[in-house]
Amino acid sequence: MTPQVELLSSAKLRINERLLRGQPEPSAVILRAVGGTRRLVVSPAQADILTEDFAESKTVPEVLVRTIAENRCPPLREFYELVVQAHAAGILLGAPLPAGEPPALRWPVRLSPGPAAFLTGTTAAISAVFLAVAIPRWSGPASWVDVVAGWAVACLLLSLGQVLAACAIAASGEVRASQVFWRTRFPHFRIDTAEAIMGGRTCEVAVAGLRAAPILVGAAVAAWQAPGWLAALCGGAIYVLAPFGHSAARQWLASRRKAPRYSIRTDFLFEPVRIDLWTRGAARWRAFVSEFGWLGVAWTVIWVAWLYVAFTHCMPKTAATIKAWLEGAPPPVHLGAEYLLLAAIALGVLVWVWVAVKHWFLQRAWVKPLGGAGARGPSRPPLAGDHAAMLAQVPLFHELDEPSRVALATAMELVVCGRRDVVVREDDPGEDFYVIIEGELEVRKRLPGKHHSAPIGWMGPGECFGEIALLEKTTRTATIVASRPTRLLKLGRRDFEQLVVARIGTAPIRELLQHARFLGRLTFTAGWPFAELVKFARRCRSVHVDADTALLTQGERNHWFYLIYDGAFEARDGQRVLRRMGPGDYFGEISLLEGWEATATVVALEDSRCLSLSRNDFLEMFARDFRIGLRIEAQAEKRLGGRVFASR
């Protein structure tokens, strides 16, 4: 289980009692743990979820079910990111926080943010004008001495900017996390400039300007007086004015927003979306535009233009080589740059195509209701102990008493299979029941009208098979092949009827195992352990529906969530057909999440069968795994044509 999955499913969390709370404006609340360095800017409703719902130790699913039941749940991505960010900031704790905190730095000099913001803004603007006018004078370094001297001055000016920023922060808050930052091309003294947010927007503007002003002034002076130093100083200015990272420009852009700069986004990246590079890139672009608006886009264009000008003037030989190659002329100096550029372009195109194709396959798999052969879960550990102890770990036999399990273990025979060995073959007579104790089996089904079979699923330790042929006295319904060395326990027909059927019952065995395997093939439950699938299957109620029968009626109250096991259904809005649904599809979720009234009429097109869940069981499933909730919410919003949960 990954840390993110554990945090959002089973970890007990509670609010940090040592919490600083600021509210510079009515629509925003700033939270920071005492001794922490990360701040969250959240809405009052989000702050209430953290401080009230996590006042006592609770899991995330418990809080989510409560907020849904009380009709105050935000969109799931917003809710989950709120938890992830609050935990990372030390606002939500999974374990007691150690006593004590690093003290704030006592800063002797203070600058009023208002005058500082005006002075630094004016200084930066004048310096930019001087730099622009001096462009014809720009040149590259004459020797390595100029490079070293310019680099050293750039480091000192960046440090000076941080010192001045600390003076502005000290006037309205605490100066924190002072250090010499070595892991950069321009090592310099640095403080936690994000603390400026605690002083309001004026303080943020002042701090951003104070960070940038010294290096801009230095570059402007070098452009006129020391051109050899300009390359390094321009590099420092580009570094501090970049529209990304923790730069001064990014801080200034964030302070320009009319609305509060909230920490929580609604397109946060969760597993398994992290492996979709296309979605990740699109989400980061949307986050950038949402955070900074078109001012940020314009600043990015200006920054790239400045980078180009600095490169062409401060590295003229390399720039001339690349320009000549692009124009088709022989390069004045052969540096191989044209080949590197061509290789970079070709590699970029290949990467773009690969990302797009992978995105298409992931999206296609995401919308498929049944996972099929792709529903292969993680490898499971073998069952441990003697045969009786192993059977105690099999979900089907959890309700058997100890003497019954011992008798069953005595009657079972150990079977060892090598890789690619066929355990049972489709259409052969069925005389044995099997329990997997180690390894992995592939389930294959013959394709209609063809002589070969295709994989439809996988089974691992703790799972059983062979009961259908024994219970219904028919032939095998699928071929089972060992995909790796496997050990099984085999039980004959007579012992199966006396020791299993007589104690558990025919219907519970058939429905429980069939429903659990069906749930394991669903896209959003494919990764569940088989024991969890069986536990969940026990809560499902099998519903047989005759053709032309309505399970849901538009406008009427609904209390159930339905998973289509087999058959076909149609959702209708009056006489208009909204969609057709088959095995693996589901319906009823909107009325259970949004209220009680069904938003469409759902009618069976043929004799069909569904698995139904009560509202409480559905909410527990919905909240148990964030990947399930996100998928169901996305599908519900697509069907509804709007949001299921609203931000507050």
Image (cartoon, rainbow, N blue to C red):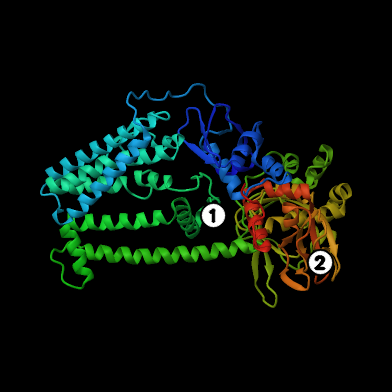
SS at mark 1? helix
Residue at the image position 18 percent from the left and 68 percent from the top:
324
Which residue ends up furthest to the left in the rendered image?
142
Viewed as shown, does residue 449 lie left or right of 170?
right
Amino acid type, callout 2: Ser
Q: Earlier in the sequence, mark 2 or mark 1?
A: 1
- Numbered mark located on residue 273 in the image: 1
| Label 2 neighbour load within 10 Å: few <14, some 14-19, many 20+ | many
Q: Residue 223 appears at what percent x and percent y? A: 16, 49
Residue at the image position 77 percent from the left and 47 percent from the top:
616
- Labels 2 & 1 near each other (Cβ < 8 A): no
Q: Residue 478 appears at what percent x and percent y? A: 72, 64
Query: Hey, which quadrant is residue 109 in on the image?
Result: top left
**Please, is residue 591 above or below residue 25 in the view?**
below
Residue 109: tell me if it is visible: yes
SS at mark 2? strand
Residue 492: tell me if it is visible: no
Which residue occupies the foreground of this view, 353 or 215? 215
What residue does disc 2 label? 608
Which residue ends up furthest to the bottom in the rendered image?
449
Amino acid type, callout 1: Val
Which residue ends up furthest to the top in the rendered image?
100
Q: Residue 249 appears at what percent x and percent y? A: 35, 46
- Numbered mark located on residue 549 in the image: none
Q: Residue 147 appears at what percent x and percent y? A: 16, 45
Residue at the image position 79 percent from the left and 49 percent from the top:
539
Which residue occupies the foreground of this view, 262 or 639? 262
| Label 1 neighbour load within 10 Å: few <14, some 14-19, many 20+ | some
Q: Nearer the viewer, mark 2 or mark 1?
A: 1
